């Protein structure tokens, strides 16, 4: 491709609305342009990367037995009524009406459509298992579209759905997808982790998110420093301690703690380790007040608390509710002398607190030398806190560390939720109708492109991994007014393409400085500069990632480039 007539509008300045490197670079390198908030067009340079990523995905999905389909973006609302999600999906779902006032939605995902397809066309166990996938545009009216195509309202997703006759079959399909995803993200040159995630209403641990490690990630991953354990902090289990209570229990004492309402204030004023304080947080579980105790250096994890009360709505009590149910303001709540109408549960680690401190249910008062079992009872000890850095890893190996991650993929065992709702059944060997057992598997294709950029850049611009680079080689005629240079560059452009390299040829009548700057910004793995030694048949080769430079004879160029590509990642 000759750069003189390639639509690649590079920008010198950082766009004002772009907060993160990938968004800035994708705009500056002329990959994307915003059409409306969270809605983007891909220009040729960006589209090429998208295509490369899609090809890797197709390759691995096909190898794993997937069959590509293409479903409509516009979906009848009735299907969403059948699955029960029309109301539940909320304002992210874009709804519309046709000219006959019939209701439709713009698909944010395709469980409903695929299940109805399979329901109509697969009737027998003989046709199962099957795994169908598509690469298609999705619509989600995100509350806060941001970071360019990382969180947009229209985006490209690869979504796959597996249909099996048995749980073991589903396990095998899931495992295959897990492996395919691992291959895909490796080939994209990404540093990522497969992380155990929250499976929402379905339960179990059979869902993984593929997270690209990055400071700008919205999710926090807890991982072990010495095993491959990794989980989203939202769900990471905390390993119970041994809770040796080897200190003598001292007599209970009520002390004055004027204006000491927070753990920080208490710990500072009383010179007390916050791990010795028992924090009491009042929650409303449906209409019932529940006092939840955790150590002062720990935080209640709402998601874990919700699992203690399946199906109930769990919310932190308002100051008014706290006053109504406990008779004292927030800051002095505690389990000792709490009204009997209030249920008390505690995080498992509270068992290890000896001679602790807790609210006395009286303004400006706390109890000192508090001991569970002696001074108060709890109904239940559970794991109800967030994991922390420094905690032992739940798998018993090593210590927990945190990292931020961008979710690029998600594999999920759905079970029979949609097949039952939409009536996707098959006849088994005995002629009996059974619901199909489903899995779903998504990859944010456009988000993956942004994640690659986020991980692969330096202060001068993009640095493309080999398999997703928009072109292999940036051929630059350093001074295109010089006849020797122009002639050799033109000749190499033909030659390199014949040698099956994908070449972007900067043939523009620009100054060398401008060309080199643009070349670094565009970040193709190898630059071939045709300059001063053109007449001698010598060119400059620069590796974008390492910055290494070589002078190479034209006669040896093909072999040299092939060798370099072998070692590049
Ligand atoms: P998130 O927590 O980031 O909102 P999600 O859980 O809603 O993601 P899924 O429904 O699992 O996402 O969708 C599958 C994949 O689609 C995600 O792993 C992600 O890579 C991508 N994706 C989801 N929402 C967006 C978006 N608004 N913009 C770009 N990609 C997205
Ligand atoms: Mg989402």
Image: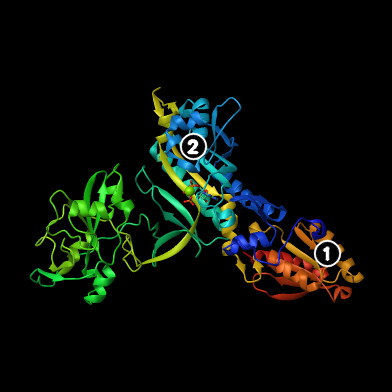
Residue at x 9%, y 68% (from the top left corner): 252
Image quadrant where one finds the N terminus: bottom right
Taking depth in this image into account, of 218 and 522 the one nearest to the observer is: 218
Q: Position of residue 42 (x, y in %)?
A: 67, 51
Q: Residue at x 68, y 56 (%)?
A: 31
Question: In the figure, residue 504 lies in which quadrant?
Answer: bottom right
- Is 228 placed left or right of 522 in the picture? left
Q: Is residue 243 visible?
A: no
Image location of residue 299, percent across then percent down = 30, 61
Q: Return the residue nearer the eye: 526 or 101.
A: 101
Label 2 vs label 1: CA separation? 49 Å
CB of mark 2 near ligand 1 (< 8 Å): no
Residue 344: image x %, image y %?
18, 53
Which residue, as the protein is rendered here, is positioned at the far top?
A: 431
The secondary structure type at the circle numbered 1 is: loop
Is there a contact, CB below 8 Å, between mark 2 and mark 1? no
Q: Which residue is label 1 attached to?
A: 508
- Secondary structure at numbered mark 2: helix
- Residue extending farthest to the right is 483
Q: How packed is label 2: few (under 14 Cα within 10 Å), some, or many (20 or more)?
A: many
For label 2, the residue is 111
Q: Residues within 10 Å of mark 1 (few under 14, many from 20)?
A: some
Display colour scheme: rainbow
């Amino acid at each position: 491709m000759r750069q003189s007539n390639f639509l690649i509008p590079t920008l010198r300045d950082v766009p004002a609305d772009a907060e993160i490197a990938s968004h800035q670079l994708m705009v500056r390198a002329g990959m994307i342009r915003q059409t409306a908030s969270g809605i983007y067009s891909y220009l040729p340079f960006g589209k090429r990367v998208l295509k490369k990523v899609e090809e890797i995905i197709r390759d691995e999905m096909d190898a794993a037995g997937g069959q590509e389909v293409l479903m409509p973006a516009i979906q009848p609302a009735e299907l969403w009524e059948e699955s029960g999600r029309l109301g539940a999906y909320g304002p992210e779902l874009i709804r519309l009406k046709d000219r006959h006032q019939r209701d439709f939605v713009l698909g944010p995902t395709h469980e409903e459509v695929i299940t109805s397809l399979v329901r109509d066309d697969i009737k027998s166990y003989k046709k199962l298992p099957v795994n169908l996938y598509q690469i298609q545009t999705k619509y989600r009216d995100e509350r806060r579209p941001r970071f360019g195509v990382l969180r947009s309202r229209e985006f490209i997703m690869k979504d796959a759905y597996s249909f099996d006759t048995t749980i073991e079959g589903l396990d095998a399909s899931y495992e295959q997808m897990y492996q395919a995803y691992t291959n895909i993200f490796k080939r994209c040159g990404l540093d990522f982790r497969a992380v155990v995630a929250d499976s929402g209403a379905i339960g179990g641990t059979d869902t993984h998110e593929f997270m690209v490690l990055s400071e700008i990630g919205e999710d926090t991953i807890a991982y072990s420093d010495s095993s491959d354990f990794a989980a989203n902090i939202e769900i990471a289990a905390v390993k119970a301690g041994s809770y040796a209570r080897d200190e003598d229990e001292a007599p209970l004492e009520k002390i004055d703690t004027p204006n000491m309402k927070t753990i920080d204030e208490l710990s500072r004023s009383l010179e007390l380790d916050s791990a010795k304080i028992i924090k009491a947080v009042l929650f409303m579980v449906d209409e019932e007040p529940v006092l939840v105790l955790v150590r002062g250096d720990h935080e209640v994890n709402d998601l874990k608390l919700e699992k203690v009360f399946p199906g109930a709505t769990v919310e932190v009590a308002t100051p008014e509710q706290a006053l109504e149910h406990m008779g004292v303001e927030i800051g002095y709540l505690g389990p000792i002398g709490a009204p009997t109408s209030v249920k008390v549960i505690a995080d498992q680690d509270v068992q290890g607190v000896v001679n602790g401190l807790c609210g006395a249910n009286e303004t400006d008062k706390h109890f000192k030398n508090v001991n569970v079992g002696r001074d108060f009872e709890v109904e239940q000890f559970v794991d109800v806190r967030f994991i922390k850095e420094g905690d032992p890893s739940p798998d018993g190996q090593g210590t927990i560390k945190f990292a931020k991650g961008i979710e690029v993929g998600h594999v999920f065992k759905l079970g029979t939720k949609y097949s039952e709702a939409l009536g996707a059944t098959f006849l088994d060997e005995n002629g009996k109708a059974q619901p199909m057992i489903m899995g779903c598997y998504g990859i944010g294709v456009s988000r993956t492109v942004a994640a690659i950029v986020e991980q692969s850049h330096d202060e001068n611009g993009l640095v493309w991994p080999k398999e997703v680079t928009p072109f292999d080689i940036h051929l630059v005629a350093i001074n295109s007014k010089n006849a020797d240079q122009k002639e050799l560059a033109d000749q190499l452009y033909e030659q390199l393409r014949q040698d099956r390299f994908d070449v972007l040829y900067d043939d523009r009548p620009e100054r060398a400085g401008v060309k080199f700057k643009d070349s670094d910004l565009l970040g193709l793995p190898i630059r071939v500069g045709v300059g001063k030694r053109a007449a001698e048949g010598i060119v400059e080769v620069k590796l974008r990632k390492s910055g290494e430079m070589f002078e190479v004879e034209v006669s040896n160029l093909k072999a040299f480039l092939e060798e370099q590509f072998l070692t590049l990642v």
